Image: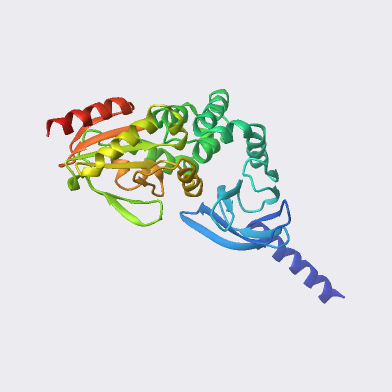
């Protein structure tokens, strides 16, 4: 009897230690699919990841984070299904849909409020990156002492559109609302964009084309180069698409190198839009958007942004007017 009692106490002790050394996530997915889930989180000085399975819509996994960390749950194509803010000792119950703005979270208060914000603002968040930024900016300005403001800025805000605005919003937050574990890398990326070598020469940099092949944008390969950096909702602006089409025809004689670089974070959505818009000019994308290697040194302070460079990489024009860029290109090519 005494031996059985001691074994029971020992089992409880092990369970208590285990619960304090990890956090637990249970969940269901609407439609009861069976699929692999990719889970990633940065904690204790390094990035961690695991792959688990949802069987008939049900899943469970355990992670370790001594300090609170953002945990991203993705499908097998790396599309975000949910994010939570978790640390050891906590338990979460999630209800997911094939829509990151329609999750329900039962766990700690901050993760629950994060999911509630996404549901209540889903229409704006889906509408366009700019509409999403406006919704998030309203919350950040009204709640500068709320940790949720930091989580929204770092994970849901499209900083590529206007890094200066993102930096300004981040500076509004109180120290308690922006712990370095969440904002350090985001702040570093913003500082690179805001203080980048705007007037410097453009060096060759890598990107992925629409077929996911690795290519390089190299101004030295043509007398003149045109770099357009934008989000896809920018192409609904009347002046952008006609200008790119006209410049594409001029690039046929190899005197102009044109690259339409997407700052989108979702490469799947980017490719779908390429097909919808019947785009025939050179398009590219790279992980990290405008913080990707090479592009991060150009100090792009808003999106869309256009740069014209000569064969040495010297920037002849940089700004947000595709009309001004096209005018300079026409003048340059006419003079040759």
Residue 276 in the image: above or below residue 146: below
Residue that lies at the very extreme toward the left in this rendered image: 336
Give the residue at x 63% y 35%.
122
Expressed as whole percent of the image width and height from the top left, the position of residue 258 reads 28, 41
Q: Is residue 301 left or right of residue 93?
A: left
Give the residue at x 53% y 59%.
49
Expressed as whole percent of the image width and height from the top left, the position of residue 10 reads 74, 69
Choose between 62 and 96: the one closer to the eye: 96
Question: Splitting the image into 4 quarters, where does residue 291 fall?
Answer: top left
Expressed as whole percent of the image width and height from the top left, the position of residue 303 reads 39, 32
Residue that lies at the very extreme toward the right in this rendered image: 1
Q: Is residue 195 visible?
A: no
Give the residue at x 17% y 46%.
220
Q: State which quarter of the image contains the N terminus.
A: bottom right
Choose between 59 and 182: the one closer to the eye: 59
Q: Is residue 73 visible?
A: yes
Residue 299 in the image: above or below residue 68: above
Choose between 145 and 57: the one closer to the eye: 57
Q: State which quarter of the image contains the C terminus.
A: top left
Q: Is residue 68 left or right of residue 303?
A: right
Expressed as whole percent of the image width and height from the top left, the position of residue 38 reads 57, 58
Number of numbered callouts drawn: 0
């Amino acid at each position: 009897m005494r031996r059985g009692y001691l074994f029971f106490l020992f089992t409880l002790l092990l369970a208590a230690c285990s619960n304090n050394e990890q956090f637990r996530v249970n969940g269901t997915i609407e439609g009861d699919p069976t699929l692999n889930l990719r889970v990633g989180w940065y904690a204790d000085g390094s990035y961690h990841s695991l792959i688990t399975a949802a069987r008939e819509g049900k899943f469970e996994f355990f992670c370790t984070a001594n300090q609170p960390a953002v945990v991203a749950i993705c499908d097998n194509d790396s599309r975000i299904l949910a994010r939570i803010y978790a640390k050891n000792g906590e338990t979460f119950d999630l209800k997911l849909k094939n829509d990151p703005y329609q999750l329900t979270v039962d766990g700690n208060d901050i993760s629950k409020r994060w999911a509630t914000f996404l549901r209540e603002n889903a229409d704006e968040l889906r509408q366009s990156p700019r509409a999403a930024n406006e919704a998030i900016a309203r919350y950040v300005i009204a709640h500068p002492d709320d940790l949720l403001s930091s989580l929204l800025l770092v994970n849901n805000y499209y900083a590529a559109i206007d890094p200066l605005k993102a930096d300004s919003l981040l500076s509004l937050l109180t120290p308690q609302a922006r712990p370095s574990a969440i904002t350090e890398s985001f702040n570093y990326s913003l500082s690179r964009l805001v203080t980048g070598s705007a007037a410097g020469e453009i060096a060759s940099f890598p990107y992925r084309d629409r077929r996911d092949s690795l290519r390089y944008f190299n101004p030295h390969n043509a007398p003149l180069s045109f770099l357009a950096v934008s989000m896809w909702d920018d192409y609904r602006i009347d002046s952008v698409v006609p200008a790119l089409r006209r410049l594409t025809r001029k690039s046929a004689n190899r005197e102009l190198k044109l690259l339409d670089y997407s700052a989108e974070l979702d490469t799947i959505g980017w490719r779908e839009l390429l097909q919808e818009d019947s785009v025939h000019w050179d398009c590219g994308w790279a992980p990290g958007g405008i913080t990707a290697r090479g592009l991060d040194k150009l100090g792009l302070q808003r999106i869309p942004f256009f740069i014209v460079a000569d064969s040495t990489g010297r920037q002849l024009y940089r700004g947000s007017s595709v009309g001004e860029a096209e005018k300079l290109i026409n003048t340059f090519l006419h003079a040759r």
